[in-house]
Image (spheres, rainbow, N blue to C red):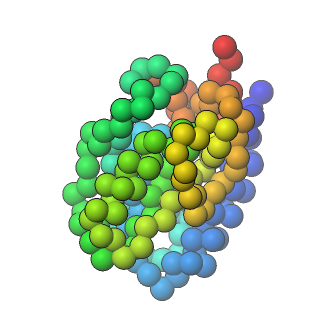
């Protein structure tokens, strides 16, 4: 049984797109998806945006092949597009400990964007280990290991249309 149904996800993505359309209607932001988890969410979101966007991806690593973050964050694949002076929207699937996205936001701040915002589909605030401001949030989620809609366990289950809790 899904924790969050595809219908709930669709409605949430539409709401987030409406918020972004309101805030960026006269701008040309750079969307940066954090791979691999954000690709499904970002694709659905980008198709609903009514302003010109550029799209870039970054690959970050902190998990390895387990269910717990290692706490050691590294940028595996950085940006090819310059961000200096640009409006940047980072697209994340889920924020849990906050360590990975905090590291990446600092990486971007050093490159001096005009603005830097975070859009996340899900927030697992109970796992937070560092303070993170989520500017555009889909929904809070419980402290369970989630799969589906881009979220994976050991590279599996990203293709599920709903978000489900992985049973122990």
Q: Is residue 93 visible?
A: no
User: Is residue 46 positioned above or below 43 on the image?
Assistant: below
Q: Position of residue 122 (x, y in %)?
A: 63, 46
Q: Is residue 141 visible?
A: yes
Left or right of residue 68, residue 108 in this image: left
Quadrant in the picture for the C terminus = top right
Rendered residue at 33%/42% (across/down)? 59
Left or right of residue 36, residue 11 in this image: right
Q: Position of residue 41 (x, y in %)?
A: 54, 50
Residue found at the far front of this picture: 130
Left or right of residue 160, residue 114 in this image: left
User: Is residue 132 positioned above or below 81 on the image?
Assistant: above
Rendered residue at 67%/28% (across/down)? 144
Quadrant in the picture for the N terminus = top right
Left or right of residue 80, residue 113 in this image: right
Q: Position of residue 28 (x, y in %)?
A: 40, 77
Residue found at the far bottom of this picture: 26
Rendered residue at 41%/62% (across/down)? 31
Residue 48 quadrant? bottom right
Closer to the camera, 58 or 160?
Answer: 58
User: Is residue 145 positioned above or below 34 on the image?
Assistant: above
User: Is residue 92 positioned above or below 112 on the image?
Assistant: above
Q: Position of residue 82 (x, y in %)?
A: 24, 66
């Amino acid at each position: 049984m899904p924790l969050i149904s595809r219908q709930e996800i669709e409605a949430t993505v539409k709401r987030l797109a409406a918020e972004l359309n309101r805030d960026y209607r006269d701008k040309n932001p750079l969307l940066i998806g954090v791979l691999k988890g954000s690709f499904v969410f970002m694709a659905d979101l980008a198709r609903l945006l009514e302003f010109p966007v550029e799209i870039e991806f970054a690959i970050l690593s902190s998990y390895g092949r387990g269910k717990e973050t290692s706490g050691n964050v590294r940028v595996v694949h950085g940006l090819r597009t310059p961000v200096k002076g640009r409006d940047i929207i980072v697209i994340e699937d889920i924020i849990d400990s906050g360590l990975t996205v905090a590291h990446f936001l600092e990486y971007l701040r050093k490159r001096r964007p005009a603005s830097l915002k975070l859009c996340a589909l899900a927030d697992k605030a109970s796992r937070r280990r560092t303070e993170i401001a989520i500017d555009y949030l889909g929904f809070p989620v419980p402290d369970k290991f989630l799969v589906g809609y881009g979220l994976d366990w050991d590279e599996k289950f990203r293709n599920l249309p709903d978000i489900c809790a992985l049973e122990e």
